[in-house]
Image: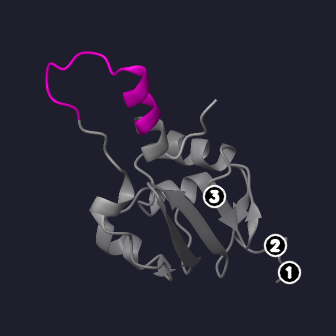
Amino acid sequence: MTNEQAPSVRVDSWIWSVRLSKTRSLASGACRGGHVRVNGRSVKPSHAVRVGDEVRVRQEGWERVVIVSRLVTKRVGAPVAAECYVDKSPPPPPREQLIPVALRERGAGRPTKRERRSIDRLFGRAEG
């Protein structure tokens, strides 16, 4: 059987079915936003996924790397979903390293220009 005849599923549908995304529309949005790569190439939501493909999904500050081992089109339970792919992802970053938080005292009002600049530096935003 050639690649054109091999069974395939839309990438957004597969990501949603194996619970890598909460909703199919979020999976489609991730594809359109360039957060989903199949075999190293950024793909559209309608791209066909086949058994053996490497799917990379960037979410919440880290990247999930999975190898497709089974195709599903309907959303399945977590135990079944875990059988549909081989997880090659690096461990997720610790929670405290995900997002720096700028804390202000409650009731302190709007930040001053100096405070806004320091907040921008904390988040790595460009000044100017």
Q: Is residue 9 visible?
A: no
* Mark 3: few/some/many CA within 10 Å (<14, 14-19, 20+): many
Q: Quadrant of residue 49?
A: bottom right
Q: Is residue 32 visible?
A: yes
Residue kind at label 3, given as amino acid type: Val
Q: Position of residue 39 (x, y in %)?
A: 73, 73
Which region of the structure is painted magenta?
A: 104-118
CA–CA distance in space, label 2 to label 1: 5 Å
- The front one of 87 and 3 is 87
Residue kind at label 2, given as amino acid type: Gln
Residue 31 lies in the magenta stretch: no
From the viewer's perspective, tell me whether residue 29 is left or right of residue 38. Answer: left
Residue with the mark numbered 1: 2
Residue with the mark numbered 2: 5
* Mark 2: few/some/many CA within 10 Å (<14, 14-19, 20+): few
Q: Position of residue 110 (x, y in %)?
A: 30, 16
CA–CA distance in space, label 2 to label 3: 24 Å
From the viewer's perspective, tell me whether residue 18 is left or right of residue 112. Answer: right
In the displayed structure, would residue 87 be above or below residue 103? Answer: below
Q: Quadrant of residue 102?
A: top left
Do tag 2 and tag 1 residues touch (Cβ < 8 Å)?
A: yes
Residue drawn at x 81%, y 72% as measured from the top left: 5
Helix, strand or loop for disc 2: loop
* Most common secondary structure along the magenta stretch: loop
Viewer-side label of 3, 1: 3
Q: Quadrant location of the N terminus?
A: bottom right
Residue with the mark numbered 3: 36
